[in-house]
Image (cartoon, grey):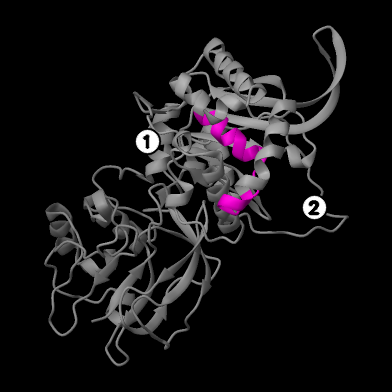
């Protein structure tokens, strides 16, 4: 039986993915578990396996295409069976059975089509099924268009399809009332946070999905329009690059964070002399036991986790009307890539030794730079550290990871003359820059967290206890 192979959801926050490379061409045989294509999400690049044996009969989305989750991207079937009905929406019986899924919730959805009298297996509501029958719309033509729970096709999806077939000119018979726009989960949450009415977000194409960037663009359009900026379109040459893939996802995430959470940044200088001495003493033993060289970032992960134990309000998320204070201290560490950054997570960092953290973070960073991190390794963080010390940066304002209350920016360690007990001494000094969500935490509690972290780093043996 021929199947529609859809864009998989590789993580709970994924809304769309970019097809980087097809490993098979049309007409090539495929086996279940064999790598079929590579997909780039906002967090990583993933290899996606074929869910079944067969032949890659048709590629529906080309390389570099940005595709929403659950949209069909290919057809897999046997070499000689007909597949035109999957591509053109030929009439097939409508039995309204639920769409079949792999046991793995992150696997691609496989929609079964009727072949030789077998029933169509696409999830559709009774009202949508009746409307489709009245209007002569084959259910297979609606595959991948469902906006209901779990991708179920509902009445508004049928109406949206009818609009596209009529050239975008709905009639009174087709659409007795305005069809509500279809929002991605992230766009719906952002619209709610920013007080944007869903009715204001209709986009130009009937049935098109409203994304988080559309919500942000709508909010910006309501502000006073600034004077136009004239860009040089002639004269010096330039190289145009598509703003897609990871760079686009990072733009969406930082925009969501900036528009949603009121950021406040506190800075504090820490004497890292004792911490540097302790690190030098521990390096040989940790290398021998764990096969990893202890870094200052490793010590910071442990120190931050310890500080969060004493200040749990910094280890939290504001989800709608609910403030969630987490028991686990899962520390994300920003890793710079050639075209962006990712944030792998050290889980339960408060329960691990600095040696175990060093070994785990070494592997995570290597996997991140190779584009091999799994969605699980890049999710679940409750607090984030971003270290720009290697670039000679002293101070900066880090932007919160969406949903998290705090992020710690770390500057370089530099030797400076400092007054110690009334005398000038050369000490290894470093700036900490704490950005926090002022909706959840006020300045004084955030400052106390930063002071606790300073004390731990200046008396580093307390980190190991």
- Residue nearest the viewer, comparing 58 with 273: 273
Viewer-side residue, 40 vs 77:
40
Q: Quadrant of the N terminus?
A: bottom left
State the image coordinates of residue 97 (x, y, percent, origin top left). 14, 64
Which residue appears at 41% of the width and 47% of the height?
13
Q: Earlier in the sequence, mark 1 or mark 2?
A: 1
Q: Tell me where the magenta segment starts and ends, as one range.
A: 287-305
Question: Does 302 lie within the magenta span?
Answer: yes
- The x and y percentages for residue 325 are 38, 25
Q: Residue at x 63, y 50 (%)?
A: 287
258 w.r.t. 248: above or below: above
**Residue 362 in the figure: left or right of residue 394:** left
Other residues around mark 1 within 10 Å, as few (<14) / some (14–19) / many (≥20) = some
Q: Name the residue under label 1.
A: 198
Q: How far apart are marks 1 and 2 (CA)?
A: 36 Å
Residue named by callout 2: 233
**Residue at the spot 46% in from the left edge and 56% down from the top edge:** 374
Q: Residues within 10 Å of mark 2 (few under 14, many from 20)?
A: few
For this rendering, which residue is in front, 440 or 55? 440
Q: Which residue is drawn at 22% across and 52% down?
A: 154
Identify the main secondary structure in magenta: helix
152 in magenta: no
């Amino acid at each position: 039986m021929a199947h529609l192979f859809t864009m998989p959801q590789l993580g709970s926050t994924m809304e769309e993915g970019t097809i980087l490379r097809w490993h098979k061409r049309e007409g090539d045989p495929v086996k279940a578990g064999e790598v079929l294509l590579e997909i780039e999400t906002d967090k990583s690049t993933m290899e996606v396996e074929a869910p079944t044996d067969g032949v890659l009969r048709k590629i529906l989305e080309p390389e570099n295409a940005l595709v929403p989750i659950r949209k069909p991207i290919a057809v897999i079937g046997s070499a000689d069976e007909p597949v035109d009905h999957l591509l053109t929406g030929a009439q097939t019986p409508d039995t309204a059975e639920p769409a079949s899924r792999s046991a793995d919730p992150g696997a691609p959805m496989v929609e079964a089509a009727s072949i030789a009298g077998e029933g169509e297996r696409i999830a559709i509501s009774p009202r949508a099924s009746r409307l489709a029958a009245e209007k002569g719309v084959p259910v297979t033509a609606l595959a991948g268009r469902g906006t209901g729970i779990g991708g179920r096709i509902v009445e508004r999806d049928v109406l949206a399809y009818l609009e596209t077939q009529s050239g975008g000119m709905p009639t009174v018979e087709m659409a007795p009332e305005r069809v509500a726009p279809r929002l991605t989960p992230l766009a719906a949450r952002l619209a709610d946070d920013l007080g944007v009415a869903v009715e204001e977000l209709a986009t130009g194409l009937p049935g098109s999905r409203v994304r988080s960037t559309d919500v942000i663009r709508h909010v910006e359009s309501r502000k006073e329009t600034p004077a136009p900026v004239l860009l040089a379109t002639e004269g010096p040459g330039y190289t145009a690059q598509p703003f897609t893939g990871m760079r686009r996802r990072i733009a969406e995430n930082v925009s969501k964070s900036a528009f949603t959470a009121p950021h406040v940044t506190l800075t504090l200088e820490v004497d890292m002399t004792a911490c540097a001495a302790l690190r030098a003493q521990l390096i040989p033993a940790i290398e021998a036991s764990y096969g990893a060289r202890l870094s200052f970032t490793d010590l910071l992960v442990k120190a931050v986790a310890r500080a969060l134990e004493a200040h749990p309000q910094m280890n939290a998320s504001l989800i709608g009307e609910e403030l969630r204070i987490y028991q686990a201290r899962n520390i994300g560490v920003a890793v710079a890539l050639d075209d962006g950054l990712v944030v792998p997570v050290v889980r339960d960092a408060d329960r691990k030794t600095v040696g175990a953290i060093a070994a785990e973070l070494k592997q995570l960073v290597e996997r991140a730079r190779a584009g091999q991190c799994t969605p699980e390794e890049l999710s679940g963080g409750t607090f984030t550290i971003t270290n720009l010390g290697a670039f000679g940066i002293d101070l900066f304002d880090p932007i919160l990871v969406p949903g998290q209350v705090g992020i710690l920016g770390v500057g370089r360690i530099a030797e400076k003359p400092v007054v110690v007990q009334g005398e000038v001494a050369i000490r290894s000094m470093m700036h900490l820059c704490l950005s926090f969500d002022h909706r959840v935490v006020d300045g004084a509690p955030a400052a106390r967290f930063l002071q606790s972290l300073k004390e731990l780093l200046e008396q580093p043996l307390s980190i190991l206890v």
